[in-house]
Image (cartoon, helix red, strand yellow):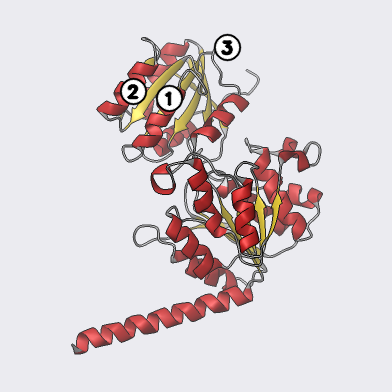
Amino acid sequence: MIVILVLIIFILLYWMVEALRLVRARRAIPVRIHVHGSGGKSSVTRLIAAALREGGIRTFAKTTGTRARMILPDGREEAVVRMGTPNICEQVGVLDRARREGVQAIVLECMAVRPDLQKITEKRIVHSTIGVITNARADHLDVMGPTVADVAVALSSTVPRKGHTILGDTRHSETFRKMARRRSSTFEIAPPDTLPPGAMDGFRFVEHDENVAAALLVTRRLGVADDVSLRGMYGVAPDPGACTRSRFDFCEARCLFYNILAANDLESTIALWNRVGLEPGGEEPSIALLNLRGDRIDRSLRFADELEKGLKADYYMLVGDISPRVQRRYDRRLPAGKLITLGRARPEEMFEQIALLGGGRFRVGGVGNIGGLGHDILRFVSSREVFDADS
């Protein structure tokens, strides 16, 4: 009994210390920006932080994204070290680290998926002064669904109390507006047509205009001029999962590869696929390299339903963890000769098969999931010798 009593006292003291540390951190950081949404959270977090730094506001940021990162006030990055699985309590330590860095602002990407944990993160930990919702889309429906409207309700739990809410996508705006009104928070939508002319021309990677519009609305509220904000955004280090383009030689063929593996939902994937020009019918065959995860069966099946409709390619290659149920769905959706299944193959094997399909040149879009084989594919691509863009 004595041991149990000592343990209880120790736990209570630990909670008290953590609570005091959290309160002290929040008081020391006047601007707390909480970024949530189905897609684009990591990008918007990085854009806002880079713009505020450029505007002279000492800023700390933390993303979960493809790899969890803390972005220091000078722009350097540190990996988030975890002893176990991700836990929202790590946000307390991040806030305290930001306090010790003497920052004026912090930008936090919401790391919670479950609706109850989203609410706890905002209500008990962050107490944001500005809440950003990028969009509400058909992702994590098993947890936040079953409908996209349910997803919007779940995401609205991070709307701040007596703060300001910025929405990057007009769909489901009434759900967020009602929550903002209930919590005495002002509400604003950031459509892409609010961007200055030519605002998207300076990015070195493929960025969504709605992400930039939402980030700019935040920086305007904090008094940073658009030209200063955009200058900071153009120099941002993109998330490792950002949509980038690579060119390389392999098996006596030339490949143009687009990394779309980290797009969190099917809608974002299709938008990027069409934006970078991966539609079929060109001189260079278009191949969709679909990396599937065994624990994301619903997402794998939704991708299958869009083949030959939204996600159009000359050929489709399935890699990763493919259950018989998923394989049957893809077989039914595609005519013979358009689908190649390799499962857990090495990236070299994948691109050898792709080179045979494409002849001398081919275009590949990596889609599905960045986890598992996704990282192996990206390491393979980054290790290839890049050839001249005009050759």
Instruction: Assign a secondary structure to mark 3.
Output: loop
Mark earlier in primary sequence (3, 1): 3
Q: Residue 207 placed where, x, y %?
A: 64, 38
Q: How would you rate the neighbour count of disc 3 (Cα within 10 Å): few for under 14, some for 14-19, many for 20 or more?
A: few
Q: Amino acid at mark 3?
A: Gly
Query: Label 2, label 1: how many angstroms apart (C-alpha)?
Result: 8 Å
Answer whether residue 232 is visible to the viewer in this image.
no
Which numbered tag is attached to residue 329?
2
- State which mark lies toward you, 3 or 2: 2
The residue where tag 3 is placed is: 282
Q: Are marks 3 and 2 in contact (CB under 8 Å)?
A: no
Q: Residues within 10 Å of mark 1 (few under 14, many from 20)?
A: some
In the current view of this chain or complex, which residue is farthest to the bottom?
Answer: 2
Relative to 102, say whether 330 is above or below: above
Circle 1 is placed at which residue position?
305
Mark 2: few/some/many CA within 10 Å (<14, 14-19, 20+):
some
Q: Are marks 2 and 1 in contact (CB under 8 Å)?
A: yes
